[in-house]
C-alpha cells in the first residue's frame, strides 16, 4: 500500500505534468504523448515544434534547484532508452532532431524550461 506522502507526490507530479503540457502548448509545441512508459523507462512529455522532437522530464520540487538535482544520470539514461523506443514506434518522427529538455516546477514560480538540458552519453556536448 502506498503511503499518503507517496500518493501526494504522485498527485503533485501529475498536476505539474498537466501544467507543463499547457505551458508548452502556449510556447508553440504540439504535445504528442504524456506519460509514455515503455519497459525501458518513462518520458513525461513528448512534444514537437517544427523539426525538433522534444523529450521532456518534468520535476516538481519545493525549489528549482531541488528539482534539477532530482534528475539523475540513471534517470536520463532511462529516458534516452525510452526515446529510442518511441522513435521505433513512431517512424514519422524519425527524421526530427532530438532534444532532451527538463522543466522544473516549484510553488509560486513560473516553470523553468531548461532547453537541451542534457545530451546522451557518447554525443558531443554536455551530459
Image (tube, rainbow, N blue to C red):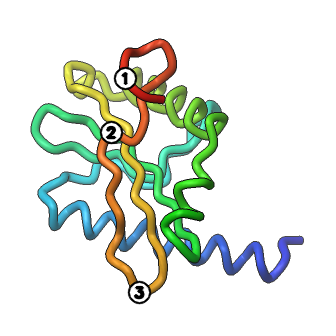
Q: Residues within 10 Å of mark 1 (few under 14, many from 20)?
A: few
- Callout 3: SS: loop
Q: Which of disc 2 and disc 3 is earlier in sequence?
A: 3
Q: Where is residue 15 in the image (x, y as percent from the top left)?
A: 48, 76
| Front one among 28 and 74 | 74
Left or right, residue 91 beside residue 87:
left
The numbered mark at residue 125 is: 1
Mark 3 or mark 1, earlier in chain: 3
Residue bearing the label numbered 3: 108
Horizontal and vertical percent position of residue 13 = 55, 69
Residue 72 image position (x, y, % from top left): 63, 43
Please tell me which residue is depicted at 41% across the width and 51% down the height of the picture.
102
* Sequence-first tag of 1 and 2: 2
Number of numbered tags placed on the structure image: 3
**Marks 1 & 2, CB-CB < 8 Å contact:** yes
Q: What element carries label 2?
A: strand
- Rendered-image quadrant of the N terminus: bottom right
From what the image shows, is residue 6 above or below residue 112? below
Q: Which residue is drawn at 49% across and 53% down?
A: 35
Q: Farthest residue in the right direction? A: 1
Please tell me which residue lies in front, 12 or 113: 113
Q: Residues within 10 Å of mark 3 (few under 14, many from 20)?
A: few
Question: Mark 3 near mark 1, Cβ–Cβ under 8 Å?
Answer: no
- Rendered view: 119 above or below 12: above
**Tag on residue 116?**
2
Image quadrant assignment for residue 66: bottom right
- Residue at mark 1 to residue at mark 2: CA–CA distance: 10 Å
Q: Residue 87, percent across and down?
A: 37, 25
Which of the two residues, 83 or 88, is positioned nearer the viewer here? Answer: 83
Q: Which of marks 1 and 2 is in front?
A: 1
Amino acid at each position: 500500500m502506498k503511503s499518503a506522502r507517496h500518493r501526494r507526490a504522485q498527485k503533485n507530479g501529475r498536476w505539474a505534468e498537466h501544467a507543463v503540457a499547457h505551458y508548452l502548448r502556449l510556447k508553440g509545441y504540439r504535445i504528442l504523448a504524456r506519460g509514455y512508459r515503455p519497459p525501458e523507462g518513462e518520458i513525461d512529455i513528448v512534444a514537437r515544434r517544427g523539426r525538433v522532437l522534444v523529450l521532456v522530464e518534468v520535476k516538481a520540487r519545493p525549489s528549482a534547484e531541488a528539482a534539477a538535482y532530482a534528475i539523475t544520470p540513471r534517470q536520463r539514461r532511462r529516458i534516452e532508452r525510452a526515446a529510442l523506443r518511441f522513435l521505433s514506434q513512431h517512424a514519422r518522427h524519425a527524421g526530427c532532431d532530438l532534444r532532451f529538455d527538463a522543466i522544473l516546477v516549484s510553488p509560486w514560480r513560473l516553470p523553468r524550461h531548461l532547453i537541451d538540458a542534457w545530451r546522451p552519453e557518447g554525443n558531443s556536448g554536455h551530459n
